[in-house]
Amino acid sequence: MCPLIPFVHQLEDQEADQWCEALRAQLPDCDIRQFSQLSPEEQSRATVAVVANPSPGDVAQLPNLKWVHSVWAGVEGMMASLAHMPFAIVRLTDPQLAQTMSEAVLAWVMYLHRDMPHYRQQQSASQWRQLPYTDPANRHIALLGLGALGQESALRLVDNGFRVSGWSRSAKCIDAVRCYSGEQSLSELLSEADIVVNLLPLTPATEGLMDRAFFHQVKTGASLINFGRGATVVESDLLAALDSGQLSHAVLDVFAQEPLPPESLLWRHPGITLLPHISAPTSIQTASRIVAANISRYLLQGTLPECVDKSRGY
């Protein structure tokens, strides 16, 4: 009997079908089916599942799970709803995702570096004025979060001539990047950076991290790019920092509530560039290959991939 691998999700039907088709192509000896297609007996047979924002109620009906593999890098939703369950959780670690994120970080750092928000405002006012040019070597970029995405982004910025520093929970060492760790060093870094890029995961330690006290530590006139998680930012404190001039601009791609409600003040603030969570979309083709390789290794050797540390949340 071939191994049964449920795909447990809350996706639109078309996207779910694409995931299942890609996984079947990579795991031809496995029975890949959506959770809704399983009988109670089949639910009890499953020991491994592939998940995409799964309903806790659906997962609870798979009583013999040993581990689940998320098709996304972020697992804060699963930590909130599934961490108490006895199985291990594996998140997606995709080199292509790191490349895609580093491209977005470079693009939007360039957007701020070359004063595009100012030029957009001048266009709206039919104003012709050239702003002074700043060499990248004189622009200090601070990356918060130095995991796979942060490290790739840091190196890409270095390759483009920027002065780059990074901060992480644990100490890191990256060529040509000044690395910080610990709460006290974060304050020092914020006071020096021209552009702060957030790539931190959402954990109990980072939720609401960017509050009034955080923004008071930021260099006056600095800019913020948030490609991490929306709940890291206290929106009212961000708006206050923009209104006071403590921050000059914010590029926001992630939000505590998505889609962002039409009534949100963030939509209309002149100091905000707003994106619909597009900085690093997951590639179904590359992600399915990685998920399939991890499941194949487990089925052949009994070896689990690196699992999420439930105590840390990532």
Image (cartoon, grey):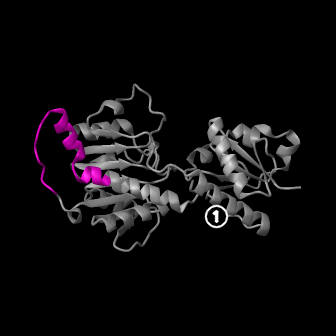
Query: What residue is shown at x 68% (from left), y 62% (from top)?
Result: 294
Question: Compared to 86, does 169 lie above or below?
Answer: below
Q: Quadrant of the C terminus?
A: bottom right
Chain part drawn in magenta: 109-133
Residue 162 vs residue 213, the one in the foreground: 162
Classify residue 3 as left or right of residue 74: right
Question: Compared to 79, does 162 lie above or below?
Answer: below
Question: Horizontal and vertical percent for residue 21?
Answer: 69, 48
Query: What residue is shown at x 48% (from left), y 33% (from top)?
Result: 259
Q: Residues within 10 Å of mark 1 (few under 14, many from 20)?
A: few
Question: Compared to 12, does 108 lie above or below?
Answer: below
Query: What residue is shown at x 34% (from left), y 44% (from top)?
Result: 251
Question: Horizontal and vertical percent for residue 111?
Answer: 28, 50
Question: Horizontal and vertical percent for residue 142?
Answer: 33, 59
Whether residue 217 is visible: no
Question: Compared to 98, does 64 lie above or below?
Answer: above
The residue beneath circle 1 is: 306
Classify residue 221 as left or right of residue 72: left
Classify residue 1 as left or right of residue 69: right
Query: What residue is shown at x 72% (from left), y 60% (from top)?
Result: 295
Residue 107 vs residue 270, the one in the foreground: 107
Q: Quadrant of the N terminus?
A: bottom right
Q: Regarding mark 1 in the picture, which secondary structure is present there?
A: loop
Whether residue 1 is visible: yes
Q: Number of marks in the image? A: 1
Image-quadrant location for residue 93: bottom right
Residue closest to the far top:
263
Determine if the magenta segment contains residue 130.
yes
Question: Horizontal and vertical percent for residue 305?
Answer: 67, 64
Determine if the magenta segment contains residue 230.
no
Identity of the amino acid at label 1?
Answer: Glu
